[in-house]
Image (cartoon, grey):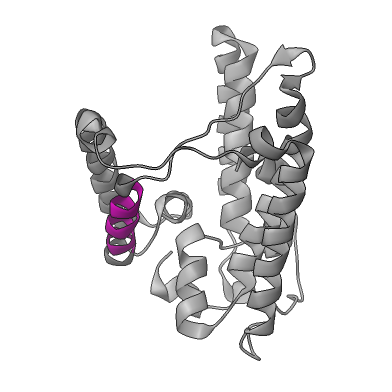
Amino acid sequence: MSSLELSLPRSSQPRPQRLGVLIVLAIAVAMSIGLTLFGWKQTVLFLIGSLFGISLYHASFGFASAYRRLFVYRDVNGVLAQVLMLSVATLLFVPFLASRSFFGQAIEGAVAPVAVQGAIGAFLFGIGMQLGSGCACGTLYTIGGGSSGMLLTLLTFGIGSFWASLTGSLWASLPKLQPISLVNTFGWTGGAIQLAVLGLIALALWKNRAPTAIEKPTQTISLLYGPWSLVWARSPLQCSIG
């Protein structure tokens, strides 16, 4: 998300033209129907991805920009929205992960170790985020909103990801700790522990928020044109894919 977008109140964001919205909806419907040729799963994934992008755009939300606003302005709303997302995702997934079954189909959580490459990647990502004025989600929704300047950020993001895939063995050889899964170790109690930790994080953020960091409702809210609140954007549907 660019600094210009961060400075503008959401109620002053220009609304898209109705004709443009109808064209985009028509293209989305056509693609949804066309993808059925490759199986219903592709259509479902496309629709979920589209809803994910719409919610990010309407809420003017970016994962990285939320932390930027936290450190610069002590605005906790964006990070609290992420805590809410993780909390709802925990409630949705822990029952299935604990039972290792999803409607009769065996499932297993993706558990990865805490490794040096994670710290290196986070550091480089933070630098790139500031230089590019957006994280992956922020870049995509900004481009979707009509900002062609972010195409360069998206291109270099893709180049870096491709280079990382070619050097995967190098990163995998760096020191790492054994993976830890709260659900595998404690079962249902692991989910409760995670919710408790998230609750403490939310409480700490709320206690240290700036006096002006409380989100104010806008006067005009449209389901089609927005703007949406951060809580609405982090809906259970989006949490399930986050």
Q: Is residue 2 left or right of residue 159?
A: right
Q: Residue furthest bottom?
A: 211
215 to 241, vertically: above or below: below
Instruction: Residue at 26% x, 44% y: name it.
Output: 155
Secondary structure mostly seen in the magenta stretch: helix
Give the image location of residue 176, x and y in percent: 35, 42
Instruction: Residue at 74% x, 59% y: name it.
Output: 196
Of 107 and 132, nearer the camera is 107
Give the image location of residue 118, x and y in percent: 35, 48
Give the image location of residue 92, x and y in percent: 76, 39
The answer to whether residue 126 is magenta is yes
Stretch of the chain drawn in magenta: 118-129
Q: Which corner quadrant holds the C terminus?
A: top right
Give the image quarter of residue 150. Answer: bottom left
Q: Is residue 239 left or right of residue 56?
A: right
Instruction: Residue at 30% x, 59% y: name it.
Output: 123
The answer to whether residue 122 is magenta is yes
Give the image quarter of residue 16. Answer: bottom right
1 to 116, vertically: above or below: below
Of 53 and 236, nearer the camera is 236
Give the image quarter of residue 101. Answer: top right
Res 77 visible? yes
Give the image location of residue 109, x and y in percent: 60, 29
Q: Which corner quadrant holds the N terminus?
A: bottom left
173 to 2, vertically: above or below: above
